[in-house]
Image (cartoon, rainbow, N blue to C red):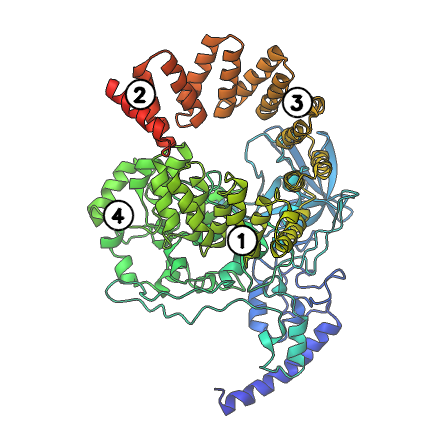
Amino acid sequence: MMRGWQKKVLAVVIIPVLASISLAIRAPGQSTLSSNPNLPQDAGVLTPAAPADFVGSRACAGCHQTESKAWEASLHARAMSAATAQTVRGDFSGNTIEVAGSRARFFRKDGHYLVETEGADGKLGLFTISHTFGWEPLQQYLVSFPDGRLQALPWAWDTRPREDGGQQWFHVYGREPIPVSDSRHWTRPLQNWNHMCAECHSTAVDKGYAPSTDVFRTTWSEISVGCEGCHGAGREHVTWATHGADRGVPHRGFSSIVAKRPVAEWTPDAATGSPKIDVVRPSGDEVETCARCHSRRGQISADWRPGHPLGDTHLPAFLSPDLFEDDGQMKDEVFNDHSFKQSLMYARGVVCSDCHDVHSGQLKSAGSNVCNQCHLPERFSSIAHTGHQTTAGAPDCISCHMPARTYMQVDRRHDHSFRIPRPDVSVKVGTPNACNDCHKDQAAAWAAAAIEKWHGPTRKGHQTYAEAFHLARAGDPDARALLQRIAARRMEPGVARASAVVALASFPSTETDATIAAALSDPEPLARVAALRGQRSQPSESRLRRVLPALTDPVRIVRLEAAFLLADQNPQQLPSEDREKLLAAFQEYEAAERLDVDRPEGRARLALFFQRRGLFAEAEAEYLAALKLEPEAAAIAVTLSDLYRLQGREADAEKRLHQTLDKSPNSAIVHHALGLSLIRSKRYDEALGHLRLANEKDPAEPRFAYVYAIALQSTGHQSESDAVLQSALSRSPYDIAVVGEALNRALRKQDVTSAAPLANRLSKLRPDDVSLARLASRLSQTR
């Protein structure tokens, strides 16, 4: 309850504040922010293209002066800006840099910032810098093109102090050559700001892509990340504040707000040194708000609003081997959210603002002191816990529990999974660990022995899935039981459960099917998506029965996955209620994919959706549009040729594949597809040549080796076929097709010594095959 003196104080404060808000609404270009010479002049300024319900950060400053001042100093306020003397940090005094065959010269002329470097045609060109991108520890630069594309240059300025190695130009890919043909070249789609960067570096972005002309007219309400980037459109909130601030108005005028966590009591328990109370986290809490940008994800809707589940507008990544280590540690740049959601802290209800000030982005306390908000320092900084003397340079909470990796050459980022160092896991599966990050001259076994000496033989840790994912990534069937346990245990992190369900699809069995089916009702939306993907191999009737309920799931990513899975169903054959749900889901899916029609992969996904629906003409149009955007997209060319095959257009399939090889002569997948096309045309000699090239150019793909071996055998080249198959078996010892063929050949030769272990291995890969189990048992006894 508000006391009388508090009401008087608020009355004195509110009246002048409301006047400043009204002024800000009338003249959004006028600053109500405090004078900050380092803040870009365009920060917080509402643009003419702003949606009508956005007011700009300057309209917020009058009432929220403390928060606004903190925001002014944040990296969010400097996320992007027009290139001016105030915002450009790089040295444009005529410097030239050359790395791995690429060259750039930076200079100024007539008030513009210019770079002379290699363009899309491979020749030196002169380009005008239109915008700065980021502030520290590096700053990148954008070039605007007439078609509305903004492209990020590969040359960046290291903003760190000179004594730390900074104050120089560098190439974000280091010394790796990036020719024009590379998809990472700065003129190519992977470096396109409009798609790759805009949503998270500006506010209220409308990509404004016109497919008919392949032109962007991208707009934003603020050039950087302003207040409404996190709080949502604020006009109704300002109206609420200027018209009496009625506390009965829902959300104080905002259309939605971040779901609030119950009040948390993080006082450490004297016995353990840590808090012992968990807090239930609501859907759409502040972690979900931060995850919109601080995660690896794809956008499926532009209608983001605070308080809504992330899965309504974005599809998060799984713990895939290209992004994460076997134990879930970050490998590629994953922007913290996936790491944090693997942590015990997240499971207990900790949110970002427990450690970070949400407006400045800074830690609430310096270094490990931020940990001491909840953990007793006398317990956790002691030598009994750390094994190290408390001297200068000794490891602290952050160095041990938040190991760091450096991205883009200079950007050092900490893993937010807050994991216990596990060098013993490193010994077993080869993952990195914090101990050997410092003790690089020692083996992981040495570090594991040291920890066992300090803490005994029992290892602890919230993340317990390293072995399961390690085996799964190797294709080892021993992963099956471990993955099933992870998928079924609700105390495991949701992203780990979801990733386990995805991995289980490679290890089919009756038990696996039951585990995946159970995950259809998992509380984690990403796990439900994974479970739906696990239904792809189900017969049509069974798939319809299992997937149909997901069409009305409360989270969009689940509904979209269900729509794709049921795209081959005829809506007219369903009861009217189910038919309406399916047709609505089809519309929602198409709308989500049309958000990405500026990208070849977005067009290809839409094409595949149409193909599954039997709309072959529409599918072909989308495939062709994708290839127009990226003529060297080999995988898309292969799927288009497959569409032609389904229509009996073998000549068109072959022609398309030849055209793609002209552009991508080293593409194994295209050589493989062309080889199959030529086999269907009974041109076996030509086919063998392309199948051989596919196997040579991608020897790690067992499918290529298997098909080539079968083709060799079928054309009378038995010894060559056996050699190819044995080589594939050594590289891919758990591939079902390869193992099965090797077993068949051993049985034909009556080679029991070779057949017995192959039969045993194949039986583990296909545990429901009773006859195979009997064969394996009989061969083992005979052997």
Q: What element carries label 2?
A: helix
Q: Position of residue 130 (x, y in %)?
A: 72, 48
| Residue depicted at 65% across the width and 78% down the height | 240
Going from N to C along the chain, the mark reached first, 2 or 3, is 3
Q: Mark 1 points at which residue?
A: 550
Inter-mark Cα distance, 2 to 3: 42 Å
Circle 2 residue:
756
Is residue 467 visible in the rendered structure shown here? no
Image marks 1 and 4: residues in contact by CB distance under 8 Å: no
How far apart are the alpha carbons under marks 1 and 4? Answer: 40 Å
232 w.r.t. 335: above or below = below
- Is residue 545 shown above or below 18? above
Residue under label 3: 661
Whichever of labels 3 and 1 marks the residue nearer the N terminus, that label is 1
Amino acid at circle 2: Ala
Q: What element carries label 4?
A: loop
Residue 343, position as x, y percentages in the image: 39, 54
Give the quarter of the image for residue 325: top left
> Which of disc 4 and disc 1 is earlier in sequence?
4
Q: Picture coordinates of residue 29 (x, y %)?
A: 73, 67
Identify which residue, 648 or 398, lies in the foreground. 648
Give, as a three-letter code, the residue at label 1.
Ala
Amino acid at pointer 4: Arg
Dot 2 or dot 4, earlier in sequence: 4
Q: Do the residues labelled 3 and 1 touch (CB within 8 Å)?
A: no
Tell me which numbered mark, 4 or 3, is placed earlier along the sequence.
4
Q: Which class describes the residues within 10 Å of circle 2: few (<14), some (14-19), or many (20+)?
A: many
The Cα–Cα distance between marks 2 and 4, rounded to whole angstroms, is 38 Å
Count residues near mark 1 (Cα–Cα under 10 Å), then give few for <14, some for 14-19, many for 20+.
many
Query: x, y percentage for residue 92?
Result: 67, 44
Query: Identity of the amino acid at label 3?
Result: Leu
| Disc sitting over residue 459 in the figure | 4
